[in-house]
Amino acid sequence: MQQHTISFFFAVLIAICITSTMDANGYGAFSAFILIPLSAVFIWLGKHSRAELGVVVGKKFQYAFSVLIPVLGVSLIAGAALLTGRSEKFAL
């Protein structure tokens, strides 16, 4: 477990250095793009499994619940705005 902790902190340090350098040189809009290949390299070097990373297929209920919560939240806010008259009904 100690080896994973050291490699994790090393990966975070590398990511901070690269993105800070890109931000300082005016490439702030693109600094997040380097994180994808950097993550892939450290996942490969660390020999992490898909299960360790949480990349597994879940249950259908979990996916339905994750879609339901934002839809329900937006619907409640929109309904409250319509009921109080604080919205443009035909803004589309």
Image (tube, helix red, strand yellow):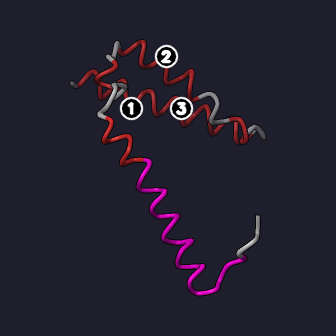
Residue that protrudes farthest toward the front in the picture: 90
Kind of residue at badge 2 = Val
The disc at residue 66 is: none
Residue that protrudes farthest toward the bottom in the picture: 84
Asked whether 6 falls inside the magenta stretch, the response is no
Q: CA distance from mark 3 to mark 1?
A: 10 Å
In primary-sequence order, the first of circles 1 and 2 is 1
Where in the figure is residue 11, as x and y percent of width and height?
45, 27
Where in the figure is residue 66, as x and y percent of width and height?
40, 47
Image quadrant where residue 25 sits: top right
Image quadrant where residue 61 sits: top left
| Most common secondary structure along the magenta stretch | helix
Give the residues drawn in magenta, as a range. 67-88
Query: Residue, x 34% and y 26% (percent of image)?
Result: 57
Nearest to the observer: residue 29 or residue 13: 29
Kind of residue at badge 1 = Phe
Query: Residue, x 54% and y 37% (percent of image)?
Result: 16
Query: Residue, x 36% and y 48% (percent of image)?
Result: 65
Q: CA distance from mark 2 to mark 3?
A: 12 Å
Q: Is residue 25 left or right of residue 32?
A: right
Residue labelled with disc 3: 15
Is 45 above or below relative to 31? Answer: above
Q: Quadrant of the N terminus?
A: top left
In primary-sequence order, the first of circles 3 and 1 is 1
Q: Is residue 38 left or right of residue 31?
A: left
Helix, strand or loop for disc 1: helix
The disc at residue 41 is: 2
Residue labelled with disc 1: 9
Query: Residue, x 49% and y 57% (percent of image)?
Result: 71
